[in-house]
Amino acid sequence: MVLSHHSTEESHLRSSEEFKQFNVEGMHCVGCANTIESEVLKIPGIEMAAVEFNQGKLIFKADSDEAVKKVKEKVESLGYKVKEGARRKQRDKLWRFFLVSAVFTIPLVINHFVPLPFLANPYLQLLLCIPVYFIGVAYFGVSAYRALKNKVTNMDVLIFIGISAAFFYSLYGTIFNLGEHFLFYETAASIVTIVLLGNILEKQAAHNALSAIEKLAAYQPLKAKKIVEGGGGEEYREIPLSEVRAGDLLLVVSGDKIPVDGTVVWGSGFVDESMLTGESIPVGKEVDDEVIGCTVLQSGSLKIRAEKTGSATALNRIIQLVREAQAKKPKVHRLADKVSSVFVPVVGVIAVLTFLLTLWAGYPVSTGIIRAVAVLVIACPCALGLATPMATATGLGLAARAGILIRGGDNLEKMKEIKKIGFDKTGTLTTGEIKIEKIKVRDGNNEEKVLSVIKVLEEHSSHPIAKSVVKELKKRGTGNSVNLVNVEEVKGFGMKAKDSEGNSYLLGSLLFIKKEIGGDVSAEGDIVLAKNGEIAAELYFSDDLREDALDTIKALKREGFGVVLISGDTEQKCRTTAKALGIEEYYAEQLPEDKLSLIEKFSRESGFAYVGDGINDSPALSRATLGISLAGASEVALHSADVILMQKKLHKLPLLFKLSKLTIQTIKVNLFWAFAYNGVAIPIAAFGYLTPMVAAFSMIFSDIFVIGNSVLMRYKVK
């Protein structure tokens, strides 16, 4: 059998696999992330790059393996370590730095508040401060050097200048025996220790908000039980997951994770699919049912035929989609990035002005240095840099765990524009599990051959109805008694083919048949088969509404959304469906170009979301302000959608819009806090109302507030 159409799944996978992820070690602040991002974007062949500082990840899109290699070389040339796969834990090293610093800093701080005679010796204070300062050089100084070498700035530049100013001014006072008013060793040491503690707390908070990718990847099993023929019959051999190939027969017993996507060929059982769909109720599986890799067989035993392995499995495609989502930043994130990029130089200028104005006002040099150091330390570009990505990552992660895949943080912003939501009918508002009520074969046609032609044609269709038709015909005992060639799917319309005898066939709606053969033909069936330009058979279907469709429509209306039904089905069927669901506005018998015109019109008038799942819906999904598709839809529809509902149900739609609203609100609060904090704290430090020690604690609190406010989203959606 020769097929003229290409696999949309393969093209989708090629596109998704262009997104790569590196784990980057050595980033201390958002400035480090901005440096890496800006340098990677300069590499030829890199279309998109985003660094998630809070997760230590670089996500990018490359057009070749050579570009990927150059990315790794560039990041390492900046002084960072690149690692594919699991991140190496750096917290142990950070903790060692902090503990050593704390041991030497505590006596200096105690002496500052409660003078101790034996610590009055400036050389003893110098000895206590030197180890802490060298830790500061190793941790902050190296990072600052990398940044300045690449003509960028980050928070470590401010920190390093601050501790160096305090340390060398104190060293100058010690060497020339200028007295205690020239000693600020405790200031340099406390800044290093406090900021190290802040980094530990930030990394711990970010670790607690693990990315959706890491949580999903953790579900992957390591091995599979392959069924092989032995001397005494079937034998079971445990093999690594990487060795499983399409077509292999695998055994899955109760409690096992299903290794790969496949089809049940023997047995029955109940499968927990909650890790992908968010649905806690196990799903019954029997022969011919599809199963998804990494879901758990709770009871029963199954033999499955592997269909998709490696990067083609549903889980790996989801991981690719989440990776793609993390690389797409909201517009408000780009604004924060721009502010962060100029923030450090501006703060440096303010610190210099603070020092000069303090001297001009008649204060001693020591006062000017302390105030300038306080300005350098209290300024917090990290709060600005974390404001958007922390909230976005939390929102995307919450959605993923609820069975909703949002393909990009920018789509979270789109959702706030939505005023009206359009639905396809078949497979979206209805179950798509078509039942054949009646088959009408025209005179002169052999029923067995006609049904065989329909079955073969539908086996090569991506439309959700086709799967149901094939399943129904199999139950009737229809086989593949004809050989078709040049099978072609006309997207959104129907199927074309010829048999070995030269007969031509068309299968689709009556509108499609009329368009192809012209003339005055009539039929009443839901789909029609034409042979050599003449009607050969008609199939009449029934299709049930989804059990959650009515409640979903009511919930969306309560939230103020307009709802419209747009379908290629008949006027009578659309009217019946719309009435049952309380939808006042509907459009029936819409061809793909009609749908596009309507959707473009609605999108121009106001924000418009479209929910569909068929191959004919893919152009509509891409033209709408926001395209939403259901899992199990055609690959083209999934690739065109901005949001994918992993459960084949609609009741997650209200949650989707609630999450979007909550995420945007959290971003706004985070940004307000970050701007307000810096706007108030820097002047206070400049006027001498904060010591550098208090300033360092304040900076840490600013970061923790932004992270904590983002994590609180978890509890607001329950």
Image: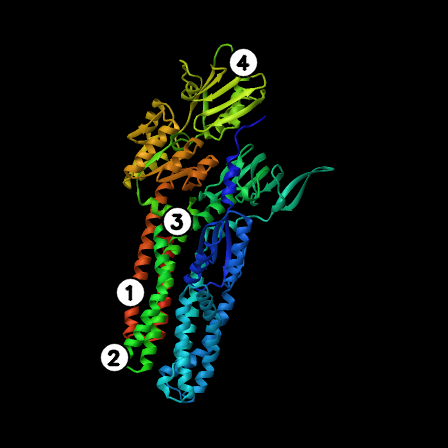
Given contact means CB atoms under 8 Å apart, are the residues at marks 3 and 1 in contact? no
Q: Give the image location of residue 431, x and y in percent.
A: 42, 31
Q: Decide: marks 1, 4 in contact (CB < 8 A)? A: no
- The span from disc 2 to disc 3 (Cα, nearest Å) is 49 Å
Residue 409 marker = 3
- Identify the mark at residue 500; answer none if there is no mark: none
Of callouts 3 and 1, which one flags the residue occurring earlier in the amino acid sequence?
Answer: 3
Name the residue located 35 percent from the left edge and 82 percent from the top edge: 113
Name the amino acid type tagged 3. Answer: Gly
Apparent side of residue 302 relative to residue 350 in the rendered image (left or right): right
Which residue bears the numbered disc 4?
446
Residue corresponding to mark 2:
361
Amino acid type, residue under disc 2 in the picture: Ala
Residue 218's spot in the image, x, y percent? 52, 51
The Cα atoms of the two marked residues, 2 and 1, are separated by: 23 Å
- Where disc 2 sits, the SS reads loop
Disc nearer the start of the sequence (1/4): 4
Marks 2 and 4, Cα distance to the nearest angstrom? 104 Å
**Is disc 3 surrounded by few (<14), some (14 to 19) or many (20+) residues within 10 Å?**
many
